Amino acid sequence: MKEKILTNVRIIDPSQQMDEDGNIIIDKNGKIKKIGKGAKISDVSKDSEKIDLKGFIAIPGIVDMKAFVGEPGFEYKENFRTLSQAALAGGVTSIVTMPNTKPIIDNVSMVDFIIRRGRDKAKVNLFPCASITRKIEGNQMTEFGLLKARGIIGFSDVTKTIQNAELMSRVMNYASDLDVLIMQHAEDYELSKNASINEGEIATRLGLQGVSDIAEKIIIERDLSLLSKFPCRYHINQISSENSLNVIKKNKSNGIKFTTGVSINNLSLNQNDIGEFRTFLKMSPPLREEKDRISLIEGIKNDLIDVIVSDHIPEDEESKRLPFAQAATGSIGIETLLSLAIELYHNKSLPLEKIIKCLTINPAKILKINKGTLKQGADADICIFDLEKPWVVKAENLKSKSKNTAIENRKLQGKVVMTFLNGEPLYSS
């Protein structure tokens, strides 16, 4: 690989508190050699490759902490190749993949398979999760130590919650001893049984069974109470309500250490967007009221929420073209994650640096991986985007294998123009 210099670029890297115009020099090994105002054209050899980025913005490659890949078992929804293509088109270079494949990733042989298959077929950095409990049934813990030793980055039962408090306390205790990350989906089953939408006026009008935000709040309160006794690396995958945020604020002020994520969908949409049974907007946690959406944005602003995720869940059309109550849950979103997040900057909801922090260095720190930064010596995983470019989301143009986007026909401002992985340009618009 030839040495490269990326010129005429605005660099925003929250890991270095950097926002300046300058250049980026990438060495022959795909590492950041020099960056910013101090990186000059005279610092590179004459035969190095020069790329003029025309004033676009460069940020560290995005780290998405929650995405589903269909391999093994659901290749008809998504596979490593199509997920990679979608991710790179969205500036995402590192992905935490969920374990709810078929079979479930809950044993060493499955971990070996997923890592080997990902290495052979994926074009992005994959960090696989294993399930907290065997078969994601909430009864018996998986072997955290063995799975961590084989390369597992964290443990999650994805959209299922450990309901048994005694089991959850043992999970936290064991996780603390082994220094592993627990990623919990917060939802009480009894309160959410058969529900498919937020409880309230919209659910009543559509004749659908709703779920109160209390179902989320109760699990968060329980887990944070347990965490005070069994401190471990604990992450709430996604929150969706103002009530949950109040619990988080109270516990953080009391010195409890944990982290919190939110889906870009809950930051950008509310229950009114569901309209007349738009099943592509059926999600877990569900879209809630506008006041909840605004509170979540404030939560990011006030450092109560650490991470923004795509919650990328590809579903085939047959699973979505059903009555709302029977339709599959979830939406694709890895390719539109950055553009939709930038919308929060354009409408003056959040500073650009704060958005980028929640997409890069914050998730990298939680995961304890050397990503999400453009510091000297780091892998040259770089996202280049045009902050102002307008475009319209069209499902047929998205690179995911499934086309179940929740924001079809939405007008966005800001688009990825190039993505580098280890110094190599793997996507260019």
Image (cartoon, rainbow, N blue to C red):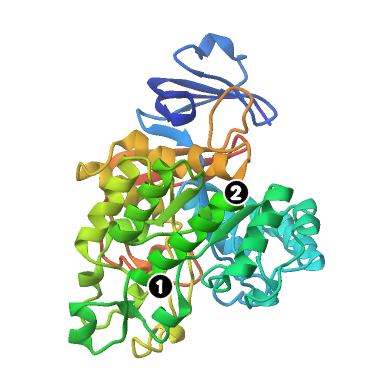
Name the one closer to the observer, 227 or 143.
227
Q: Vertically, is 361 above or below 78?
A: above
On screen, residue 216 above or below 350: below
Element under disc 2: loop
- Residue at x 56%, y 70% (from the top left corner): 78
Give the residue number, with chain letter if any, for mark 2. Answer: 231
**Quadrant showing the N terminus:** top right
User: Mark 2 belongs to which amino acid?
Assistant: Pro
Q: Amino acid at mark 1?
A: Asn
Q: CA distance from mark 2 to mark 1?
A: 38 Å
Please provide percent x and percent y for residue 158.
55, 67
Q: Position of residue 396 (x, y in %)?
A: 39, 69
Q: Nearer the viewer, residue 405 or 151?
A: 151
Q: Quadrant of residue 188?
A: bottom left
* Disc on res. 286: none
Q: Looking at the image, which residue is at 58% across and 73% down?
A: 164
Kindly identify which residue carries mark 1: 404
Instruction: Classify 10 Å Cα crowding around label 2: few (below 14), some (14-19), many (20 and above).
Output: some
Q: Circle 1 — which element?
A: loop
Q: Is residue 236 above or below residue 133?
A: above
Front disc: 2 or 1 = 2
Q: Is residue 425 visible?
A: no
Residue 210: image x %, image y %? Answer: 31, 81
Whether residue 380 can be seen here: yes
**176 or 265, nearer to the observer:** 176
| Residue at the outermost front position | 229
Marked residue nearer the N-terminal end (2 or 1): 2
| 191 on left or right of 102 | left
| Callout 1 crowding tier (Cα within 10 Å): few <14, some 14–19, many ≥20 | many
